Image (spheres, rainbow, N blue to C red):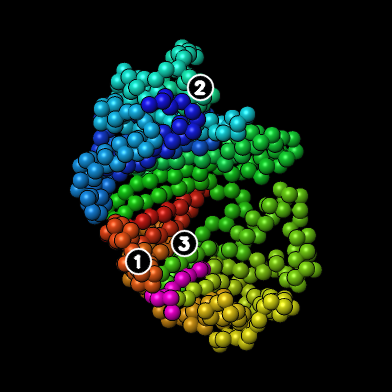
Amino acid sequence: MAAMTSFRLLIRISLASTATCALLALTGCFGPAGSGDTDPATIAPATTPVLLEATVDPEGDQETAVRALLAKFPGGDSAASGGFISSLIQDGLTAAGAPINYAEDIQPWLGQKASLFVTGVNADSTEPEVALVLSTTDAGQAEAALQKAFPGGTEKTVEGVKYRLGPQGDLAVGVVDNFVVIGTPTAYTSVIAASKGNSLSESDTYDNAVSALPESRIAAFFVDPKALVSLTAGSAGIGGPEMAAQQAALNDIKPVVGSVSADANGIVVDSATTKVPGMVVPQPGTDVLGDLPGDSGVALGIPDLGASAKASLTQAGSSAGMDPDMINSIAKSQFGIDALGMLDWIGNTGIFVSGKSLSDAGGGLVIQSKDPAASADSLKQIQGFLGDQKDVSLGKAQVDGDAGFSIESKDLPAPVVVEQRGSALAIALGAASAEAALGTDDRLSANPAYQAAVARLGADYDPSMYVGLGPLLDFAVKNFGLDKDPTFAAVAAYLTPLTDMTAGGRVDGETLLSRFRIDIQ
């Protein structure tokens, strides 16, 4: 088999290895503890904009939770014992063209941590400089595996560290400290330099960011938007005032970090970032979803949408050298709509989808108005604009309310109803959906499935998304004939344990915390 030395093969190996690490993390087995426990960030350059990390061998509560979750799926007992997963890993290595065997060539030396990070962008090819890092408990065995996987090449030495450069000169492999490193040559030399000092782990920015993550986790990620913009702008040849403007817009943006963990009920993804001036954050106790129709199978909520949109518009206009009032003047002259005025009254906003069949499917948008008189006036402006359009057919209000109209089209199964009632404004498909959105009975907050999902999310997290995966799967099966599809039949048993998805957020001092989870029952 030909030696794997091209950049594209590195990407294939990286993807296969990243998938391997994820599978390893979800099995809670395989990785012997030992000298391979060092944090990969100790050899990542301090300017690294993106770092992904996985724990090869979860222990304690994470191992217990992962094994319990796997047992809920077909073949879960085999997966938890390692047999099923090891075969999947070997299949992945084979698909990537790796001339090595997992059980013989990797398992004996694989340590606790695996990481993939970007160190830069190649100025000539604009391809990313990437390093795949695997902690090792036996450097000698690891080096032997590298010789087998990447034969040939030229031996190099940088700052006293030896490595091999592939025959085509675009791939470097070797062992740095307690890590196997496979990467582009520039990334590799950056790793060597970081191992001597000035690594990401020594950065206050990194340290402060990851301190917000749960200590018990099976994977983590770190993204520094400012460093990423500098990286991509530099590779694209962007500089001078344009680069300065981009940097200024990101001056207050802090890194985003996240983790993946497991509990007895599902998989949890937590992320954290630092609040910046002008950022609109959810107020404690704000359940935007709870007021949506009780049979909503999909529900999304955005706290204070108008304020968020106005802050983003102001920031974007400032970066582009345009005053938001100037943009608003253009909107008024062209469309007769006071766009900024609309943003002032738009408050909490919810989106919902409901129905058990195509015949009763519905959904819409519900906005809580901060100023009912202003929102009613905006509706009149929008109605006037739409009424002037030749291809739009307007009709009368379809439900009782204070102000509204309907939009009819032969391409829609029902009219789009736009109606305000009190401080609630709905834009919904059909009169039934609009009435459900504006009514006061049968709210999502009283739905037992929703209540249970929000409780699992965490009492201190204000929910912003809810998807009932069970009902959604039933809808797809009944309405699209999936039960007669042999391909679907093969995977249906793996989908059935998935019950719902939720997401939410909360504020802890200057830190904005977000959580997403998939529940498995």
Near-viewer residue (238 or 482): 482
Callout 1: helix, strand or loop?
A: helix
Q: Is residue 415 magenta?
A: no
Q: Is residue 176 above or below residue 389?
A: above
The amino acid marked with disc number 1 is Leu
Instruction: Provide the residue designation for mark 1.
Output: 482
Residue 148, how many percent across, how many down? 34, 22
Q: Is residue 339 above or below residue 511?
A: below
Residue 119, how many percent across, how many down? 53, 30
Circle 3 packing at 10 Å, graded few (<14), some (14-19), many (20+), is: many
Instruction: Provide the residue designation for mark 3.
Output: 464
Q: Which residues are magenta?
A: 350-359
Circle 1 packing at 10 Å, graded few (<14), some (14-19), many (20+), is: some
Say which quadrant the C terminus sits in.
Answer: bottom left
Instruction: Provide the residue designation for mark 2.
Output: 168
Near-viewer residue (29 or 82): 82
Relative placement, left or right, of 343 versus 199 is right
